[in-house]
Structure formats: structure tokens, C-alpha cells
Image (cartoon, rainbow, N blue to C red):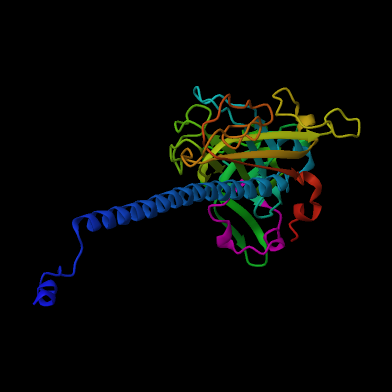
Amino acid sequence: MRKLRTRDIKRSPGFTMIELLVGSAIMLVTILGALFIYARSNKVSVEQQMVTEVQNDVRSAMFFITRDLRMAGAGLPVEFSSYFIQGWDNEDQSGSEVQPDRVRLMGNIDDPLNLRIQQYQGSSVVINVDDYSFEQYPYPDVFYENKTVIVLPNPTSGCMAAEIRVITHVTHSTGGTNERFNFSPGLAPGIDPPGGMSGTCPDSDDYDGGLIAFVNVKEYWLDTNGAATGYLMTPENGYVGEPGVLYLTHNAVHFPLARNVENFQVEYDGDLDYDGLLDGWSPWNSGWGLDQISRLQQVRIWVLGRTAQAFTSVGGTPPGGIHLYRRPLISNSPAAAADDLHRRFLMDSTSNIRNMSLNLYNLGER
């Protein structure tokens, strides 16, 4: 009876309240630890994604800039070799802390064409070229439509004003005779070649014996405030109005190349003092004459990227002198005074300007 009574009063299977509380506390700590690790990993992943985006933006921008710099001036006659490049040093953009540089290029950068002008009509609607001129190039007639060209006067005329126009179509007779370019009246709007050579000679005869060529006027510039006005062409045709965007303005149309760009600096090198030696790197000098500009041979470019948001996973104080989290000194553009925890990526490159050296290219041979 005693054994039976003991078996009857034995407790039923289960957990006590204390055991449940202890187990729940352990489970809660485990879940919170897993969530902390996940949040930390996700934060690091997001920040690394920002760094990757900045690196891709900077590299893609540098590719286009250096490619076009190498082709600056290609296809232009030697008499016009001073008009292939123009720069601006540290432009002030409405109180922005960073003052970026700007560079404008011109040349047959994409497609070669150089045809001798036989007769220039005063209205500039029609330009006759030598017979069999179109046969020198592998372009069908429709290829010329809406292409931008530069009409260069005969250098012996003494006039150095060039007209920028857009082709409506070309016409010629079977067999390659009576070949001519047709344009709509008026100059191509908003396209300003380097050196201020845009204009019209006073006498239409100045263009007889001159050249007509495809032209690309390309300008690289950084918008630091998202409100570009004044010195820029009309802020439309691709302008997004967002700070930190590096643009390529190609024949008056804006192409956003890269976001997350903080600074854009350019320096130049050449034999400007005619001693047979390169003078060394310097920012653009507005006092350079046309003859000095024609002797520029190299361009160095810096593109500085910055993450869109500050890093929150940085522990402690960033080491001094590294400037991962501070805008560095570039060319004559000053550095920032303090860290802001935005990660930077700086890339620089040097391009040799082909300029007038491509004789085969100038003849239109590929």
C-alpha cells in the first residue's frame, strides 16, 4: 500500500515555470545575437555595395575621358591645331565647397571625314565638294543625315572662323559628280568649339578651298550643386539637376556619365617655351596663347568618387594620413579639413594627345 501510494502521487511530465523562463531567456538571447550579426553583416554589405558603385562610376568615367583626350584634334588641319582643346581651372559653382575643372575637346573623334570645298554658297544651305569626294569614304548617303560637321575656311584667306552645321542630306549625280552637302539655314545651336573659333567669315569666298569634316565638340564637367546655370549651355537635353554627376556634353547634348563624383581635376604638359623639353604639369592657364595650346602633348586627369552615405560601421578613429574618409588634395584643389566618414575612391590617368599626328586618319583611311 505504501509503494502504491508513492507511485500515485508522483508528479506528471512537464516543465516548471522557472524552466520555461530560463529557456525563453536563452532563446531570446540567441535570437537577438543572430539578429545583431545579421544587421551588422547587412550594414557592411550595403556599405561595400556603395564602394563598388563608386569604383564602377569612376572607372567608367575615366575610360571615356581618356579615350576622347587621345583623339583630341585628330582630323583637323595643322593650321587649326590650336583649337583642339580648352580648359577651365577650379570653376566656382555657386558657393560649392569643391571647385572642379572643365575640359572641352574637338576633333574627328568618332568618324573620319575631310573633304575639300569646291564652292561655298553664301546662304550656307549648299556646299559643293570636289567630284568623287564621297567615294573616298565607305559611308552610304543616309549616314550623313543629322551628322554635325565643321566648315573650315581656306587658311590662306586669313579668316579663322569656322561654322558648325548639321547635315540634312547629301546629293550627287551617278558616277560621283556634282557632289554637295545640304543644310538647313542657320548654325547648329549651342555647339561652341574650343578657342572661340565659332563664327562666319565675312566673305563666302573664304571657304572655297577649305575643308568640311565631321566634328565632335565634347566637354567634360562636374556638377557640384545640381543647379548649373550661366556658363553652361541651356540645362536641358539630358541634364538631371543632381549634384555629384559628371557629364559629357557632346554637341550640346548632356550625357550623365557617372554619379557619386566629388571632384574632377585636370593638368596639362607640353613644350610651351619651345626649348625641346616638356615643361611639367600645370593647371590650365587662361593666359596661354593659341600657339602654346597647340604644343600641349599630355593631359592628366583625376576623378574622385565618394559614397552617397556616410559609413556607420567604422569603429574608432580612422588612421591619420590615409584620407579614406576625407577629401584629399588633388592638383591645386584643396583638401577637406576633417573626416566625414564618406568613403573615397581616387583614380588618375595620363593621356598622350594624338592631336595632329594621325596623317592616315586625316586622309580618311582606316
Q: Nearer the viewer, residue 30 or 236?
A: 30
Q: Is residue 19 left or right of residue 151?
A: left
Q: Is residue 143 magenta?
A: yes
| Residue in the picture at 68% in, 46% down | 66
293 and 276: which is toward the camera: 276
List x then y, in percent, for residue 247: 54, 41
Residue 58: tell me if it is visible: yes
Q: For residue 157, which quarter of the picture? A: top right
Residue 148: x and y in percent read 58, 48
Image vertical order of residue 130 relative to residue 79, above or below: below
Residue located at (55% from left, 48% from top):
57
Residue 128 is a magenta residue: no
Looking at this view, is 213 or 106 the one in front? Answer: 106
Tell me where the magenta segment starts and ends, as one range: 129-149
Picture coordinates of residue 347 (x, y %)? 65, 43
| Residue 329 occupies quadrant | top right
Which of 337/250 is in front? 337
Most distant residue in the front direction: 2
Q: Quadrant of residue 104?
A: top right
